Amino acid sequence: MSLAEVLSKAARSDGGIGGANWNGGPLSGLRNKIINGNFDVWQRSTNLTGTGGYLAADRWYVNGSGATVSLGRVIINHGDLPVDARARARLTAQTADDNVGIWQKIEGVRTLAGRKATLTFWHRSNTGSLPTGLRAFIKQKFGTGGTPNADVTVFVPGTIPVTTAWTKFSAVIDVPSVAGLTLGSNGDDHLQVSIENAANETFVLDIAHVSLVEGDATGEDDPFSPRHPQQELSLCQRYYQRRGLGIVGHASTATQVRFAGFLREMRATPAAALLTTTPQFVIGNGTQTAAGATVSTIQLTTNGFRGAMEGFTGLTANLPGHVIGATDILSFDAEL
């Protein structure tokens, strides 16, 4: 029996059974393998529409499966749920297709391998546009590069009934062992947790308070195991972050600014993207705004960056500068 299972069965001070002992202890926040399970962190946007990808909520990948989908943040009124959740994710399939849902890719395929795990979340549909084929599963992804093993998928049996009332879902999953299996050489292996609607239809689904913990936690009122907000943000920033203020540099020509900055340590060398074509720098003692800005060169590591940005006019070479304004100008993506 694992440590998590022993503690989940231990008597509580209030006479109950299980995981409140974990949830109140100094290590409680390490128990939940899901990052941003309370949907508190939305660095990209609080509502975005597209055909899939990392649209809005940090760490949550939207599987559009050919449909037009949106993911948005909705505040939960105090008392609506019997758990501590301030926000929910609203997934809307605006056009019909099957297998529309959200995934979380947990770094490391060895996560919980060979052990029992409990997946728990709350769900509802607020409009009567009910998903009729909701299901949950895990998928062990062995990564890319070299000759990794094929994916291994384990479904929770049956479909999950959805109504307009908040309902708790909780199920135990036997996570397969990965002993003797081959991982890819690119360091991107992971355990994928998926909540999808298998039916080909439009729908609206609200999801909140998602957790994946070791052992059988189905007897616990709430195995979520919250972390401090700063911890949650820092975990999210291992995979995605933005920078604006704090970027420094100098004018290298009349039209170019060379810049540099630091990042929180990321999972891998990230991909960078310019978020605005009109960034503002203070160069010398004057504010300069680019028009149609582009990043002509950039060098990246897991904890820093430097590059050159074009699109300015009338700069005086060699004058120092820094970004001004509240808007971030660069994003850095190291998602799985």
Image (spheres, rainbow, N blue to C red):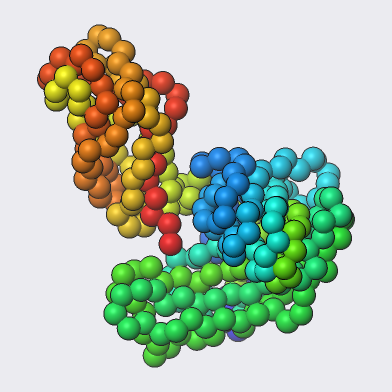
Corner quadrant of residue 130? bottom right
Can residue 313 be seen here? The reply is: yes
Q: Toward the viewer: 76 or 308?
A: 308
Residue in view at x 48 percent, y 81 percent: 151
Please indicate whether residue 36 sits to the left or right of residue 317 in the image.
right
Residue in view at x 31 percent, y 70 percent: 186
Quadrant showing the N terminus? bottom right
Could you tell me residue 13's position as x and y percent?
A: 76, 61
Residue in view at x 25 percent, y 9 percent: 285
Residue in view at x 35 percent, y 73 percent: 144
Corner quadrant of residue 255? top left
Please indicate whether residue 72 sits to the left or right of residue 243 in the image.
right
Could you tell me residue 173's position as x and y percent?
A: 65, 79
* Vertical comparison of 61 with 310: above or below: below
Could you tell me residue 324's position as x and y percent?
A: 36, 20
Quadrant showing the C terminus? bottom left
Q: Residue furthest bottom?
A: 180
Could you tell me residue 33's position as x and y percent?
A: 55, 64
* Vertical comparison of 237 with 316: above or below: below
Q: What is the count of numbered marks?
A: 0
